[in-house]
Amino acid sequence: MPASTHRLRAPARPFFPTPTSTPTARWLALGLLGLLGLALSGCSETASAPGAAAAPPAPEVAVIEVQSAATALTVELPGRLEAQRTAQVRARTSGIVQQRLFTEGSQVRAGQVLFRIDPASADAALASARAQQSRAEAQLSQARSVLERNRPLAAEQAISQQELVNAEIGLKLAQAELEQAQAAVQTARIQRSHADVTAPIAGRVGRALVSEGALVGQGDATPMALIQQTDSLYVNFTRSATEVLALQRALQGGQQQRASAAAAQVTLVLEDGSLHPHPGRLLFTDLNADPSSGQVTLRAVVPNPDGLLMPGLFVRVRLAQTQAAAVALPLQALQHGPAGAHVLIVDASDQVAMRPVQVGPTERGQVLVLSGLTSGERVLVEGFQRAAPGATVRPVPWQAPAAPATSR
């Protein structure tokens, strides 16, 4: 090959700068080497990681296993207390009140003197009536002696028969006048007794409506005090006719049974939420419904030996009338939605499902479920925010919170 055909090629420039390269090129090469190392390390970590992430554990929820039992169904209704007996103390004679002989608010017995009215006029009337009675007795004695004298004279025909008849009539008139005088004395004695105003019944007397020096009994019987028997009180309350009809249908259909005598007691819930310690008993249910309100009136009598209850107080009446198979649940287990009341149950595969229920009365933090649940089912009580319907959960038994310790 001719020498002219050979061309000398310039040596190839290396990829990385040589030590003689510029400082900028040298820092650029170092940066590329760092990025390459990070990429290689990331690839190695990715290759060494497991193929898929582990699933999160099922959330823990608290459940209660329900049991159905025959339970007395109670209802709370508003009621008002009324004294069992009430008597008004009134002035039955006219005069000035001299004394008040009782302490306001105290217990009084029947026949106890409460007020004393000035008896001067009554004493004068009684004395006048007794004088008239003495005069009538004298006239009767005179008429009797005249008749006894005229009878033998008439038999001897010493006097006419008409004179004998007149003597007999005079005796009868004298007897009638004596009886009239005796009645006047009795009336005056009664009026004199009315000067001492007594209690018609035993009970608690209220405040005095008149004071000493007041003129009473002028034209009408002036009210002086009020006595109420409070050892036992009536409580009057109402229930809607619709509820009464529904109760009767449930009894006839067998869904509910009449409560026992012990369960049918009436318990009062006072305004502060406490229970009256003495249960009462239902007296009657009105046979007629009020046409204006559709309410049926009920009445019960409640013992009040301690005097804690007062007439006129508003109370809540807790009444148990029927029994039914029901499930008791903590109140927090019940939820309400557009479709009504429901609970969340955990089935055998630990999945959550929604169950509609029919609820009854609520008492002491528990609600009675009348239908929708069966014995042995598990109802969710705590952990609702972690258990939507259809989710899988890990159920644990629910523990009721301990009652707070009372300080001594």
Image (cartoon, rainbow, N blue to C red):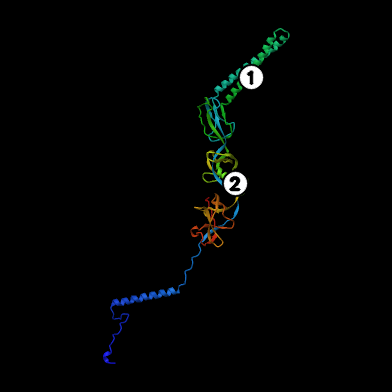
The quadrant holding residue 193 is top right
Q: Is residue 403 above or below residue 116?
A: below
Q: Which amino acid type is marked by label 1?
A: Glu
Instruction: Read off the residue under disc 1.
Output: 179
Secondary structure of residue under mark 1: helix
Image coordinates for residue 27, horizontal then vertical, percent: 31, 76
Q: Amino acid at mark 2?
A: Arg
Q: Which residue is mark 2?
A: 249
In the image, is residue 61 above or below residue 244?
Answer: below
Picture quarter with the N terminus: bottom left
Q: Position of residue 349 (x, y in %)?
A: 55, 62
Q: CA distance from mark 2 to mark 1?
A: 68 Å
Quadrant of res 199: top right
| Res. 126 visible in picture | yes
Image point 57% across, 47% down: which residue? 74
Closer to the N terminus: mark 2 or mark 1?
1
